[in-house]
Structures are given as C-alpha cells and as structure tokens.
Image: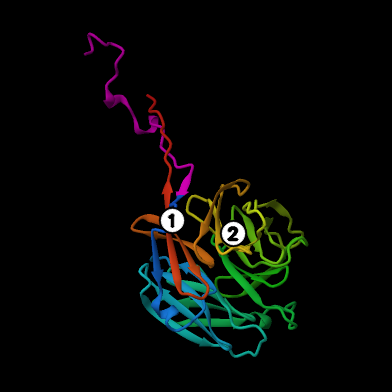
Amino acid sequence: MKQEYPELESLCNVFMTDIIKVASDKVVITESAESVVDIVGIKAKGYGITGLTSSSNGNIVMTGVVSKDKSHITVTNMKGEILNQNVLNRNKRFRVWPERYCCNLSGCNVITVCIPDEIGIYNISDSSYQKKNISDMVQTWSAFGRFVRSVTTSPAKNEIIVGTNSREVYVFDYQLNYSHTIVLPDVIRYSCDITVHDSYLLICDFVGRTSYAVTMVTLGSKVVYKLTKPNLSGADVKPYSVCIDKTGLIYMLWDAMGWRNTILTQYSRDGRQLLTSIPVEDKVWYITTSVVDGEEKLMIVTKSSGKMFIYGLVPALPLKAITY
C-alpha cells in the first residue's frame, strides 16, 4: 500500500482533535404527541393545574388549585402515576383563587409561589415545605390587589425570580431572602410566565398579547427583542407559558382566542426566529422539559382535564466531513 500510495497516511496518525465534531444545530418536535397520559390523582379529584416543572430525578411536579382556599403540590412519574400529593391551606383571604406555580430549584427541591404572596421550597422526597410571605419582606408590595403570577430561577446567580400581576418582578436568594426588585419596561403589562435565557428574562405578557426578552437590571430594564407571534388568520393569540430545552431553543404556548387548539411554537436560540408552529389538540396551558432515559422530552398539561402530552425532541444532526 505504501509503495502504490505513498501519500496515504496511517489512521494511527489521525488524532481525535482533528475530527470535526458533529453538533446538533436543530431540534425537531415530533409531529404528534408520543403519548397522552391521564393523571388520575388530578382528573378524578377535579384539581386544577396552574404550574408544571420537572425535578432533577426526572419526576414531574404539578401545582394548582383545589378549592377557594386550598392548593396542591403533586409529584408524578412519566406514566402519570402519583408518587406523592399534598394539599395546602391558604391562610389569607383573597379575592383570587389560590393558583400555585412552580419551578425546579436544585436536587429534590422545588420553588413554588401561591396567590397572593406566598413563596416556599418544597422537598419532593419527604414532602417538607418551608414558606414565607413576600409582603413581610418587601416594603413596596401593594396590599391592594397585587399577587404572584409566575416563578423561575437563575442558577448562574442562585436567584429565585417571582413575577406578579404588575411590572414588578421580585428577586430572592435560595434561602428565600429578598434581594431586589426588577421593574419591567412600560410596554409590558405583567409577567404571566417567565424564564431566564442568556442573561435575559423571557416574559409572556398575556394581557399585552406579546412576549419579550428583557434585561435583568434593577433599574431601567429594556426590551432586547420581541418574539414573533404564530400567524393564525383571525386568531388573537396570547402567550401563556415558556420553557427552554438543553440546547437553548425556546418553546412557548399561545392561547388562540377563537380557536379550539393551543399553539406550540419553537424559536431559535437567540429568540429572533420562529422555527415551528404546531397546533395542540386540547387547551393546554403549561409546558416544561424533562430527560427520560437520556432523551429530552417536552411535556404539556391541560389546566382542568388532567391530561399530559409528551412530545419527543429529536436532534437533527448535520453531516460533517472528517478532516485529516
């Protein structure tokens, strides 16, 4: 071989660093849900779902309304089987029902907030729960109708971020100590749902019918970009829930007023390009991702019928040449 092809090099001389790595620059959502799960412990009891997240061990945490003065925290597996469920009393009288929202914190801990001003850390392994009232820590909290509306975390800063039915967003540390307030730009009405992405806050402004990325500064928060709405003729779409996958792509649920279905959208990593719009065959309201057997899945739940839709997220791998 060497005599006939003197220019041929042995593969022993090829180093792994010389091979171009195959990187996924696109993730495809499966055309239809891989499975639809009935959550018996939710549906049979008539509980509402107003919050959804995945725990570090892959279980699903749902929070929501039980009655006028009670809320629930429910932990299930991917089959919808209840692992544990707690009903919590609301001590304060308030005109709005006790909708409860949640977000994964760390380990077995989930951060949750409940209308009007409760914030707490729930441990899914032993069902322990520690809570505080935001109005006891924040002097600017308005007693006249203000209430929590969403919660997320910034792991890079070890911060908990709580959205409200106003432009004020409150920031806490992982011990539930108040840190500071972010005032959203005046084009935003309130944060129906929020998440942190690339040092920005992604805001679902349901009342304002628009979603934005904004800076996370204490004073002078500014809009970085506005996410493109799905184009539905005659439909008044409103953003309701948002999440990020492990590659940094953005997923959002839009309530299509006048349409039967909710619209699931996927955006590029920088949020400036709408990649996919998919109608979901039900009025789903909350979205999150979870890793199942090493593969990331997209989970969406209904607010009142106790159904969970599970979609696959399939990396589209481009073909790359091997260089020597």
Q: Position of residue 269 (x, y in %)?
A: 56, 48
**Residue 179: where, in percent of width, then height?**
65, 70
Looking at the figure, which quarter contains the C terminus?
top left
Q: Determine whether, in the image, residue 188 is placed left or right of residue 240.
A: right
The kind of secondary structure element at disc 1 is loop
Which amino acid lies under the numbered mark 2 shown in the image of this protein? Val
Where is residue 321 shown, x and y percent of the image?
Answer: 40, 28
Q: Which mark is residue 244?
A: none
Q: Residues within 10 Å of mark 1 (few under 14, many from 20)?
A: some
Q: Which residues are magenta?
A: 1-28
Q: Residue at x 33, y 58 (%)?
A: 293
Tally the numbered discs.
2
Q: Is residue 281 magenta?
A: no
Residues marked 1 and 2 touching at CB (< 8 Å): no
What residue is pinned by disc 2?
196
**Displayed quadrant of residue 236:** bottom right
Q: Main secondary structure of the magenta part?
A: loop
Q: Is residue 145 toward the left or the right of residue 262 in the image? A: right
Q: Nearer the viewer, residue 50 or 11?
A: 50
Residue type at mark 1 is: Ser
Q: Is residue 281 above or below residue 272?
A: below
Residue drawn at x 41%, y 37% is 22
Q: Which residue is mark 1?
A: 32
Using the rendered image of the protein, determine whether residue 59 is visible from the camera's viewpoint: no
Q: Is residue 32 above or below residue 66?
A: above
Question: 251 or 246, which lies in front?
Answer: 251
Q: Quadrant of residue 252?
A: bottom right
Identity of the residue drawn at 65% across and 51% down: 228
Residue 12 falls within the magenta-colored stretch: yes
